[in-house]
Image (spheres, rainbow, N blue to C red):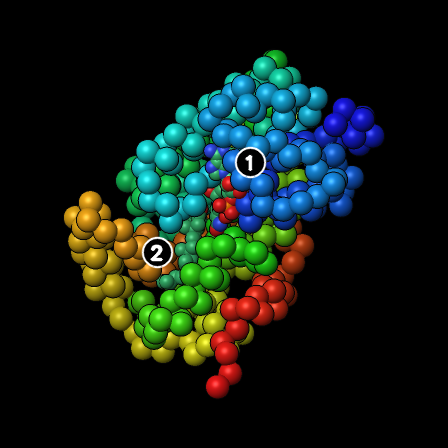
């Protein structure tokens, strides 16, 4: 590994924590393409590559992290339990306690830069956000455990910024990441369509939302790593990274569905009715949990995301790091639909 690190040059050596995941794999691919030497630290190994050094372990274990961080200049921390896990203890352990271990391990290993994948949802409380800036306060009442712990995680990382000791941190807040190999947006949407649950548009269908193509998210992270240094505007700050093309939620869903030969939803259900039905269902499933575990398609969080405006300004990222999306929304949707032949509706 030391040879590879030297070959890439000290400044272009990195470790991607969560590198086996959807965003992580795209991050690894683009970092390699840019000449970085790349380590991956993850609790799972989900791909093979002779260009990457894998370290398998739990990020909550600082001692397990250290070998993967020694000698690298940049750490990208994009690990998290899946939002659908809905496991408060797991979210707290990995996203809060685990992130403190990541920070300690970075400091001990002499890592200079830590780029966290946070989430635009850290300011979302289920009510409309239109062109929200990073100055919005953290959600006082996060809608779910995932968001609750993403807030704690981001606060820990940004407050760890310590330029006097050459340790610089920043957080990237994407929203609605989609693209090839996404495990949670397109597959869940298609599953809902296949089970006949995608006949209704929640609300009037005019609510604008940010969906961000995965390659744009990676681009934002790498830009952040390259612009993060002593005295830069990124130190200790969070940045929205989006496609900069907010789109009606149900227009996006319909374009993915029709792109895969499924019928788009066409009837409307009032937002408040859908939300309270989802809330009632979530309470019922919580009562049944000791007996049976049932995953709801329409959770309160998903209904809130489907029925409200929530799009964010990425002006701060444009100014501080010269960010602009590298793949347009139209091109991104086309590439995504093309990448899922197995999810296409079987023709009769
Ligand atoms: N998917 C989305 O729409 C959005 C995702 N994000 C954030 O982006 C990041 C990546 O998300 P995805 O790629 O969608 O998730 P993912 O579930 O595909 O990948 C997460 C990776 O983290 C790893 N991981 C989880 N717990 C771990 C532990 N204890 N130790 C080591 N590795 C562990 C998993 O094995 C997985 O490979 C997450 O931090 C998520 O909060 C932010 C905004 C939107
Ligand atoms: C109503 C339908 C059943 C919705 C089907 C698609 C949903 C599964 C996705 C639509 C918006 C997505 C989204 C996320 C997860 C998958 C969706 C709900 C996140 C909650 C993932 C983690 C984050 O950090 C948030 C910013 C994402 C918001 C959008």
Cβ of mark 1 under 8 Å from ligand 1: the answer is yes
Q: Secondary structure at mark 1?
A: strand
Kindly tell me whether residue 61 is visible in this rendering. yes
Rendered image quadrant of residue 45: top right
- Whether ligand 2 has any atom under 8 Å from the Cβ at mark 2 is answered as yes
Residue 101 screen position, x and y as percent:
49, 22
Name the quarter showing ligand 2. Answer: bottom left
Above-or-below relation of 330 to 155 = below
Query: Residue at the spot x=40%, y=72% of the render?
Result: 194
Residue at point 36%, 60% (across, down): 306
Residue 25 locus on image (x, y percent): 62, 46
In front of the other: 318 or 333: 333
- Mark 2: give few (<14), some (14-19) or many (20+) Cα within 10 Å: some
Gap in angstroms between the C-alphas marked 2 and 1: 27 Å
Q: Give the residue furthest to the right.
A: 7
Comparing 103 with 54, the one in front is 54
Residue at image point 33% right, 40% down = 87
Quarter of the image with the N terminus is top right
Vertical relation: 178 (above or below) 102: below
Residue labelled with disc 1: 42
Numbered disc in front, either 2 or 1: 1
- Write down the residue under mark 2: 302
Q: Mark 1 and mark 2 in contact (Cβ < 8 Å)?
A: no
**N-terminal-most mark, 2 or 1:** 1
């Amino acid at each position: 590994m030391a040879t590879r690190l030297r070959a890439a040059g000290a400044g272009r050596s990195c470790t991607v924590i969560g590198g086996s995941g959807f965003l992580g794999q795209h991050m690894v691919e683009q970092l390699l393409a840019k000449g970085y030497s790349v380590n991956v630290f993850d609790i799972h190994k989900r791909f093979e590559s002779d260009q990457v050094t894998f370290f398998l372990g739990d990020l909550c274990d600082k001692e397990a992290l250290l070998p993967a961080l020694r000698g690298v200049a940049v750490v990208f921390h994009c690990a998290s339990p899946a939002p659908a896990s809905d496991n408060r203890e797991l979210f707290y352990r990995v996203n809060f306690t685990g992130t403190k271990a990541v920070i300690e391990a970075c400091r001990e290993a002499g890592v200079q830069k830590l780029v966290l994948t946070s989430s635009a949802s850290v300011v979302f409380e289920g009510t409309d956000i239109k062109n929200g800036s990073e100055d919005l306060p953290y959600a006082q009442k996060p809608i779910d455990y995932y968001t609750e712990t993403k807030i704690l995680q981001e606060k820990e990382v940004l407050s760890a910024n310590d330029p006097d000791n050459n340790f610089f941190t920043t957080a990237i807040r994407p929203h609605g990441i989609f693209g090839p190999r996404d495990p949670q947006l397109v597959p869940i949407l298609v599953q809902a369509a296949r089970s006949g649950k995608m006949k209704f548009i929640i609300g009037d269908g005019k609510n604008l939302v940010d969906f961000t193509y995965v390659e744009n998210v990676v681009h934002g992270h790498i830009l952040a790593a390259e612009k993060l240094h002593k005295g830069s505007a990124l130190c200790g700050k969070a940045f929205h990274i989006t496609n900069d093309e907010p789109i009606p939620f149900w227009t996006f869903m319909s374009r993915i569905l029709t792109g895969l030969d499924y019928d788009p939803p066409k009837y409307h259900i009032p937002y408040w009715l859908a939300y309270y039905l989802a809330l009632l269902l979530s309470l019922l499933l919580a009562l049944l949990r000791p007996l049976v575990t049932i995953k709801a398609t329409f959770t309160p969080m998903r209904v809130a995301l489907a029925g409200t405006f929530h799009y964010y300004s990425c002006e701060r990222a444009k100014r501080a790091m010269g960010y602009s999306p590298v793949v347009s929304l139209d091109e991104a949707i086309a590439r995504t639909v093309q990448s899922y032949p197995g999810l296409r509706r079987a023709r009769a």
